Image (spheres, rainbow, N blue to C red):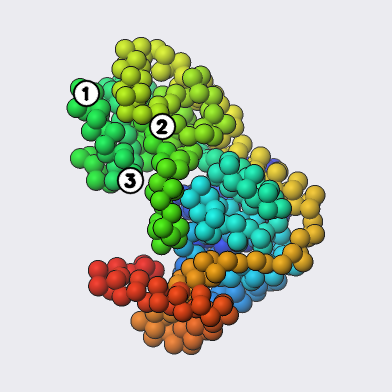
Amino acid sequence: MENDSRKRSAQRVLLLMATKNNAYLNYHRDCFEQRFDGFYCLVLADTLRESGVKRTQSRIMEIIEREGINLVIVMPFALNFEISVEFYASLKSRAHLVFWFFDDETYFDAHSKYYAQAADAVVTTDLLAVSAYQKLGMTAISYFSSYSKDDYFPSNVKKDIDVSFVGNVAKQDRRAFLEFLSKEGIRVESYGNETPNGPISMDRMREVFSRSKINLNFTKIDPWTSVCGDDPLLARARSNKGRPIEIALTRSFCLSEYTPTLNQLFVIGREIDVFHSRNDLLEKVRHYLAHPDAGEKIAASAYQRAIAEYESETYFSAIFNQIDSMINRSGHERNNVPILLSRAFETKAVRGLTILFFVQVRHGRFLPAFDVMLEALKYRPLAVIQGMYLGTIRMFLDILHRVNPWG
């Protein structure tokens, strides 16, 4: 992204990021760093593992006071229950607080809505969740996804791939869709986990988009049962993905599985097209392979929309303008709203703290481990019992399978 000092904000921002081992979170961190004059980042996974909960909280407070932070942005994962909602709420007397959630279509009920109680505003990638937050008296902003034109751009290459898919084919029924097309005589190339071509780099992915006459996008979610519990209806849920924006920025055609809010991202039939079933997919694929000009026309329109609205420099400016407007309008009027937590939420929080406790003990960090247990005991007794049991079972299974949940 162009580093233009005229576009930098004078705000002093602290980003609390779940992990540094996620390319998309790192991309947002880099974009924010270029936007703000005073920018500081704390990786929660590393700090919690090294120092425990209390010292992590103390470090957050120290940075806010020392650096004069006036905006805290939290980008958690749905498994992150270690820092309490009450602690985040206490930060609002020192700085404005924004949660930036990426998977509310899956984790709104289990995780996000409880943490959102502490925030001045929430940024969510689920358009339908905006109304759900508002129903609870919370301020929310929709954010689909954003990418840089320096990373995704049109390539002058021959379109020698009929149909392609880039992603994890093990999720939901993606493999079944791709195999169905192949059995019907459609030439499909897939890239990513558990595909013949394997994972590919960003440069290679951009090239695949440009070479493909049709780029597929799937929208069914793949919830973690450890967070959502036994909720079979989530298997039917669909969500907007960032993939159509990536494809559009390369001026390539995207054929997406339908989702109810996709038409808010791109105009269906003019900037993107959709399928509802296997047979519908096959019919659309055959149509666009027989009429490549139709796909190219849609791709050109999608490119113009993506450059104008979703390219990172433009999009982040729009999002932060909305954040500033909402914060200025609401001030700190919600500071005294009581925090309400369900027993299910508390159980998940204790489960996460129990896992962290075992990690601390395994590495000989006994004082932080003791602090973690004290934090867990703040919750209701039944939640403590259930959470500790579930956390212990999880750690036992991880050790059995030689998995380290904290890297």
Q: Horizontal placement of 29 versus 324: left or right?
A: left
- Identify residue for label 2: 257
Q: Quadrant of residue 264?
A: top right
Give coordinates of residue 204: x percent, y percent.
32, 37
Vertical placement of 358 versus 148: above or below? below
Where residue 316 appears, x then y in whole percent?
61, 43
Which residue type does callout 2 highlight? Glu
User: Mark 1 or mark 2, which has the lower sequence index?
Assistant: 1
Q: Picture coordinates of residue 93 (x, y %)?
A: 75, 67
Q: Earlier in the sequence, mark 3 or mark 2?
A: 3
Question: Which residue is at the front of the view, 329 or 286?
Answer: 286
Left or right, 336 with respect to 141, comes to right
Marks 1 and 2 sit apart, C-alpha to C-alpha, by 18 Å
Going from N to C along the chain, the mark reached first, 1 or 3, is 3
**Badge 1 is on which residue?**
184
Q: Quadrant of the C terminus?
A: bottom left
Which residue is tagged 3? 171
Amino acid type, label 1:
Glu
- Local packing at callout 2 (Cα closer than 10 Å; few below 14, some 14-19, many 20+) is many
Query: How far is mark 3 from mark 2, CA to CA?
Result: 14 Å
Q: Is residue 338 visible?
A: yes
Which element carries disc 1, helix, strand or loop? loop
Q: Secondary structure at mark 2?
A: strand
* Type of amino acid under label 3: Lys
Q: Are marks 1 and 2 in contact (CB under 8 Å)?
A: no
Q: Quadrant of the N terminus?
A: top right
